Image: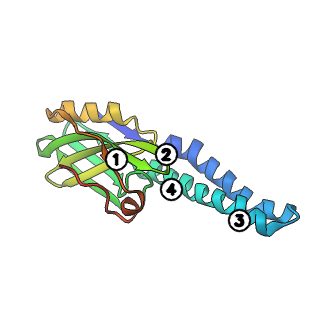
Amino acid sequence: MDKVYTGRAVGAFVYLPLGLYCLAIVLVTPFFVEDPVWYLILVCLPLACVTLLILANAYGAFASRIEIRDTGLTVHAPRWRGSPMPPVTRFTVPWSEVTAIRHRTEIYRLPFPFPVPVYAIETTAGRAVFGGRYGLKLDHALRAVAGMAHVPIRDERDVEAPLFATLRGNGPGWL
């Protein structure tokens, strides 16, 4: 059984065009308004932040990959859960080296609660953490990984995740 889960189609046909469209709005529209300073502060700056988030999700969709083969598992996962950043964690292991599959919800406060489903594949080669929605069908992929590796998916309690600490790479640890 060879199965590949990737978010490249979502990245190419949803995130990338949306991000480029937002970027075009940010770059072009200030030339067509009477008072560009207020427009830049009130519209372009927030839209530029959203654009960066969308383009980061496009990167996450392109970089995320789970390959399930008869001989083992290959994983490519961005380093951060909610907004992926390079570099990408990569490893290939036989099924006997997959030690656990974990699932939890990380709740970010933006000032409203923003829940993000997070999964971790733990192996003797390291841990790959997937979070957010990159078009991977993570539920299906990790059920298939758990079945091939003969390990259960451990559901853990929800955790409060500090947004800026997680952006710096200090997200909440796994128990």
Give the alpha-carbon distance from disc 3 to disc 4, as whole Å: 22 Å
- Nearer to us in this view, 88 or 32: 32
Task: Write the residue at 65% across / 56% down.
Answer: 47
Residue 61 as seen in the image, left or right of residue 175: right
Q: Position of residue 37 (x, y in %)?
A: 78, 69
Task: Write the residue at 17% across / 55% down.
Answer: 125
Give the alpha-carbon distance from disc 1 to disc 3, as whole Å: 34 Å
Placement of 72 over or under 35, stated as above or below: above
Q: Tell me the tag on residue 130.
A: 1
Which tag, 1 or 3, sits closer to the chain's start? 3
Residue type beneath disc 4: Ala
Q: Tell me the tag on residue 23.
A: none
Crowding at dot 4, Cα within 10 Å, few <14 / some 14-19 / many 20+, comes out as many
Residue type beneath disc 2: Phe
Q: Tell me the tag on residue 56.
A: 4
Placement of 3 over or under 175, stated as above or below: above
Residue type beneath disc 1: Phe
Mark 2 in CB contact with mark 1 (< 8 angstroms): no
Placement of 89 over or under 158, stated as above or below: below
Q: Tell me the tag on residue 41.
A: 3
Q: What element carries label 1?
A: strand
Q: Name the residue under label 2.
A: 112
Which tag, 2 or 4, sits closer to the chain's start? 4
Which residue is most to the bottom?
37
Q: Nearer the viewer, mark 3 or mark 4?
A: 3
Asked which quadrant contains residue 173, the reply is bottom left
Q: Where is residue 136 in the image (x, y as percent from the top left)?
A: 41, 39
**The N terminus is located in which quarter?**
top left
Q: Nearer the viewer, mark 2 or mark 3?
A: 2
